[in-house]
Structure formats: structure tokens, C-alpha cells
């Protein structure tokens, strides 16, 4: 899934935060080029 | 989706090529997940940001979808996402994002 891909992480404060997703991706060998945690309140 | 995030995604698509990018969402419900997925596949539905009318057709998954879950070490998954996976409507979110993923514009039969 991550092979050869540049990963964009769009987390959300009320869902799953960007750093949590990014940590999973990096641990699996993926390359995160942008990560954010948005808030729609 | 934040306007600044849309600008960044558009720039990254220009730099790397849309086919090189993979988007992972953390949206809390099916509605917001679908809008976020739509924004990176078909363009910003609110026509407010840089991705308005930009049909990038990016590959997009939610962090709760089994395709993503299967890539992640169990211990890391539990530490980082486990609690929220118990709270959020994972199956409904997965259906919403998969629907948008399958709306990806056709490009050269690829």
C-alpha cells in the first residue's frame, strides 16, 4: 500500500489525530510528506 | 477541509504527480470522511479552496479501513488508534470513503 507512495495524512481532532496516523505509517515504512490535524468546531 | 491543507495538497500533487500520492484520513464520521475524500478525488465540493474543480483523483483511505489496518503493526495500532477505533463508526466511514475512491476519474485506462 505504501510502496513508492508519498503519504499525506489528514487527521481530525474529533476523530484520529494526524500524528497518530503518521506514527502508524512511519512504523510501516511509509514516507509522510504532510500531516495535519484539522478541527471543524 | 482547511484551505491551507488544500493549497498544500495541490502543490504536492504538482510536485510529485497525483499518482505518487496516497491520502490517509482521520475524519470522525461518515459525512466528514466522504467530504474529505471527495475533495482529494473530485475536487472541493464547496468551491472555496485550491482544490475546487481540481479532479486530482488521489488514492484515499481512512485510517479505520481494513486496507490500512492490515499494514500496521498490532502494538502500534493499539497505541495510536485503538481507542478511537472502538468509538468511531468504522464500517460506515469505510463505506463512505470507498464510494468516493471508486468515483475516481478515469485516466488513460490505468
Image (tube, rainbow, N blue to C red):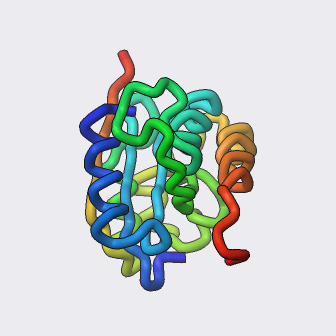
Image coordinates of residue A33 in percent, x first then y, are 27, 65
Return the residue nearer the eye: B92 or B50: B50
- Work out whether residue B62 or residue B79 is closer to the camera in this orientation and state it: B62
For the N terminus of chain B, the image quarter is top left
Closest to the observer: A19 or B45? B45
From the image, which quarter does the C terminus of chain B lie in?
bottom right
Q: Quadrant of residue A38?
A: top left
Q: On the rendered structure, is B96 left or right of A21? A: right
- Which residue does the image show at 46% across and 57% down from the upper left? B23
Residue placed furthest toward the top = A41
Name the one closer to the observer, B105 or B65.
B105
Question: Image quadrant of residue B95?
Answer: top right
Number of marks drawn: 0
The spot of residue A14 in percent (x, y) is 42, 29
Residue at 34 percent of width and 26 percent of height: A39
* Left or right, residue A37 beside residue B66: left
Residue A27 in view, yes or no: no
Q: Residue at x 70, y 40 (%)?
A: B96
Indicate the position of residue B64 as horizontal and vertical percent values.
59, 51
Residue B32 in the figure: left or right of residue B50:
right
Looking at the image, can residue A8 be seen? yes
> What residue is at 39 percent from the left and 47 percent from the top?
A10
* Residue B30 versus residue A18 in the image, above or below: above
Q: Quadrant of residue A23?
A: bottom left
Amino acid at each position: 500500500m505504501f510502496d513508492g507512495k508519498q503519504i499525506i495524512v489528514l487527521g481530525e481532532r474529533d476523530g484520529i489525530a494526524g500524528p497518530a496516523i503518521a506514527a502508524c505509517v512511519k512504523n510501516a515504512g511509509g514516507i509522510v510528506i504532510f500531516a495535519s490535524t484539522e478541527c471543524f468546531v | 477541509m482547511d484551505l491551507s491543507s488544500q493549497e498544500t495538497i495541490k502543490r504536492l500533487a504538482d510536485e510529485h504527480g497525483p499518482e505518487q500520492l496516497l491520502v490517509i484520513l482521520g475524519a470522525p464520521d461518515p459525512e466528514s470522511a466522504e467530504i474529505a475524500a471527495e475533495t482529494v478525488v473530485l475536487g472541493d465540493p464547496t468551491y472555496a479552496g485550491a482544490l475546487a474543480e481540481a479532479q486530482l483523483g488521489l488514492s484515499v483511505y481512512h485510517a479505520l479501513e481494513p486496507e490500512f489496518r492490515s499494514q500496521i503493526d498490532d502494538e502500534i495500532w493499539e497505541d495510536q488508534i485503538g481507542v478511537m477505533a472502538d468509538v468511531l463508526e468504522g464500517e460506515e466511514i469505510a463505506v463512505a470513503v470507498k464510494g468516493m475512491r471508486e468515483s475516481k476519474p478515469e485516466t488513460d485506462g490505468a
